[in-house]
Image (tube, helix red, strand yellow):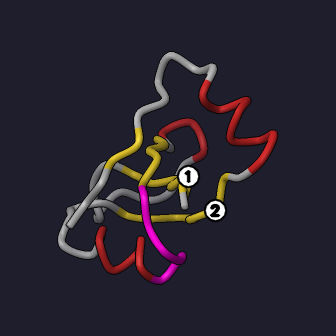
C-alpha cells in the first residue's frame, strides 16, 4: 500500500504549513511507515493512505516517486 507522508526536513523544526514537504512510502500500515521513518531525521506530521482515484491523481504529479524503505 502507498502512503503519503507530510513532514518537516529536520526534527527540530517547528511544523509550519509552508515548510511542509511530502513523500510517498510503500508500507503495510501507518505504523509500519512510521517505524521505517523513525531512523530518518524528519519531523513526521501525518501519514495518510493513498488509494483508488486519489492514488491515480497523485501519480500524475511530477513529484510522484514511491520510496521503498527497509
> For the residue labelled by badge 2, is the local secondary structure a helix, a strand or a loop?
strand
Magenta includes 30? yes
Q: In the image as oriented, which residue stretches furthest toward the right?
A: 53
Above-or-below relation of 58 to 21: above
Q: Closest to the observer: 14 or 46?
A: 46
Range shown magenta: 26-31
Residue at point 44%, 67% (across, down) = 27
Above/below status of 6 relative to 36? above
Q: Of 36 and 16, which appears nearest the observer?
A: 36
Q: Which residue was labeled with disc 2?
A: 48
70 or 11: which is nearer to us?
70
For marks 1 and 2, give the CA distance: 5 Å
Q: Residues within 10 Å of mark 2 (few under 14, many from 20)?
A: some
Residue at image location 55% in from the left, 52% down from the top = 4
Crowd band around label 1 with a 10 angstrom C-alpha radius: few (<14), some (14–19), many (20+): many
Residue on which the image places disc 1: 4
Evaluate if marks 1 and 2 touch, with contact meaning CB atoms under 8 Å apart.
yes
Task: Assign the C terminus to one quadrant of the image.
Answer: bottom left
Please provide percent x and percent y for residue 36: 29, 72
Please give the name of the residue rendered at 54% of the width and 49% of the height, measured from the top-left corner: 16
Query: Is residue 46 rendered to the left or right of residue 65?
Result: right
Sequence order check: which comes first, mark 1 or mark 2? 1
Could you say which quadrant of the image residue 14 lies in? bottom left
Left or right, 3 with respect to 60, comes to left
Q: How many marks?
A: 2
- Quarter of the image for the N terminus: give it: bottom right
**Helix, strand or loop for disc 1:** strand
Amino acid at each position: 500500500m502507498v502512503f503519503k507522508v507530510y513532514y518537516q526536513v529536520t526534527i527540530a523544526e517547528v511544523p509550519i504549513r509552508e515548510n511542509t514537504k511530502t513523500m510517498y512510502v510503500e508500507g503495510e500500515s501507518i505504523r509500519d511507515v512510521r517505524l521505517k521513518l523513525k531512523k530518518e531525521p524528519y519531523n513526521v506530521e501525518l501519514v495518510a493512505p493513498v488509494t483508488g482515484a486519489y492514488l491515480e491523481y497523485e501519480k500524475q504529479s511530477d513529484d510522484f516517486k514511491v520510496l521503498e524503505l527497509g
